[in-house]
Structures are given as C-alpha cells and as structure tokens.
Image (cartoon, rainbow, N blue to C red):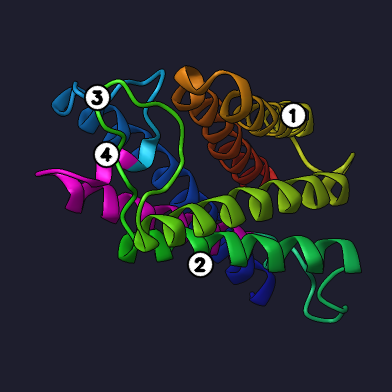
Amino acid sequence: MIAQNRLRVRRVVAAAAMALVVLYVLVDVVLQALLPRYSVLSDAESDLAVGPFGWAMDLNFLARAAMCACVIAAILLLKSPSRPRGSRLSAWGLALLAISGLCSAALVFAPADVNAPGEFGMTPHTSIGVVHVTFATAGFVAVLAAMALLTVWASGALPLFRAVLMFGVLGCAGLTALALCIAVAPQLVGLAERVCLAGILGWAFVLCLGIRRLR
C-alpha cells in the first residue's frame, strides 16, 4: 500500500511539472502576441515582465520555480525509503535545481532593464537591472548544471532517456549561443535565450513523462 501511494503521488507531481511546462510556454506565446514591440530575436524573455501584462510574466517566473519543485519531488519519490536518498550526483543535481527555482522566483522582485529603440544586448542600466541579470544568469547556469548531473544519474534507467539527453544538449547549446550572441551578435540574444529555455523546459517535460511511466 505504501509503495502504491508513493507511485500515485510521484505520478501526480510529475504530471504537475509537465502541466507547468505547458502553461509556461502558453503564457510566453500569448504575452509575445500581446506585446509585439518586443522582438523574439533581439529582446530577452524577461522584457515581457515590463509593461501592462508584467504580472502575467511574474506569475510565469513563479510557475517555473514551482516546476522545479515538482521535478525535485518526483525524483525524490523514485527513491526507496529504506535506502539513502540517492548518490552524490543526484544530490548535487537536486540542490542546483532548487537554486535555479529560487533564482526564477527572485526575478519577480527585480524587473529587467528594457533596451531603448535601436539598442541590443542584455547590459543592465540600473541596480535593479544588475540584480535581475545576476539572478537570471545564476538560474540558467544552475539549472543546466543540474540537468547535466541528473541526466548522467538517469542514464539507462529512465524511459525516454534519449529525449532527455537531446533536450539537455539543446539547453547547453542555447546557453553557449547566448554567451556568443552577447559578445558578437546582440541582435540575436532573444533567440538564443529562447533556444536555451526550450532545452530546459523540454528536458523537464520528458524527464517527468519518463518518471510517470516507471512502475
């Protein structure tokens, strides 16, 4: 009975993480349509939190934090209570995933600095903007490091592992492209950031889908 309850709860929290991923993407798409002055190619996603619908993007940041919490819970529920709660690899991965969720939630309290017309890149102009970039950067680095550790931990033991690995690679490629764009092609930072986000969200979705399929 205990094992059945753990399975049920694990599937519920994994499904919640998947639902939050879908919600996050839908809110982003709707806000982008409502705020066409922000370019998908050149403007950071965080700019959507500045304007009349900023509250919706703030809720999205919180949804991403909640998604991280659900992924952590789903992974922890894979562990048997009679054994230690995982290897050092998974422990570090879960800790970094928690940090990334906290960084996402912190973005609510530190809005981004929006570029002036004809200006590109992600250079902050105010102290609040510096705080935003700091948390956003720390969140991206933490979540991608967590993805790498947890992907290695799940290697060969989880359904849809190839898809998990594919999205992990996409996220890392997106972050690398973002760093390059900031340095040499600031007109494309928005696109690179969204590629990175696609990798992160896709990784969380297929990981939780695989967890739901485990018995």
Q: Marks 1 and 2, how far apart in space?
A: 23 Å
Residue under the point 49% across and 19% down: 188
Which of marks 3 and 4 precedes in the sequence?
A: 4
> Is residue 70 visible in the rendered structure shown here?
no
Which of marks 2 and 1 precedes in the sequence?
A: 2
Q: Marks 1 and 3, how far apart in space?
A: 34 Å
Q: Marks 4 and 3, how far apart in space?
A: 16 Å
Q: Are marks 4 and 2 in contact (CB under 8 Å)?
A: no
Amino acid carrying label 2: it is Leu
Segment tinted magenta in the rendering: 47-74
Give the image location of residue 103, x and y in percent: 51, 62
For disc 2, the marked residue is 102
Amino acid carrying label 3: it is Pro
Which of marks 2 and 4 precedes in the sequence?
A: 4
Describe the element under mark 2 as helix, strand or loop.
helix
Give the image location of residue 151, x and y in percent: 80, 44
| Numbered disc in front, either 4 or 2 | 4
Disc on res. 48 = 4
For disc 3, the marked residue is 117
Give the image location of residue 157, x and y in percent: 86, 44
Of helix, strand and loop, which mostly describes the magenta segment?
helix
Q: Is residue 65 magenta?
A: yes
Give the image location of residue 191, x and y in percent: 48, 21
Describe the element under mark 1 as helix, strand or loop.
helix
| Numbered disc in front, either 1 or 3 | 3
Q: Residues within 10 Å of mark 4 (few under 14, many from 20)?
A: many
| Numbered disc in front, either 4 or 3 | 3
Which of marks 4 and 1 precedes in the sequence?
A: 4
Residue closer to the observer: 75 or 44: 44
Describe the element under mark 4 as helix, strand or loop.
helix
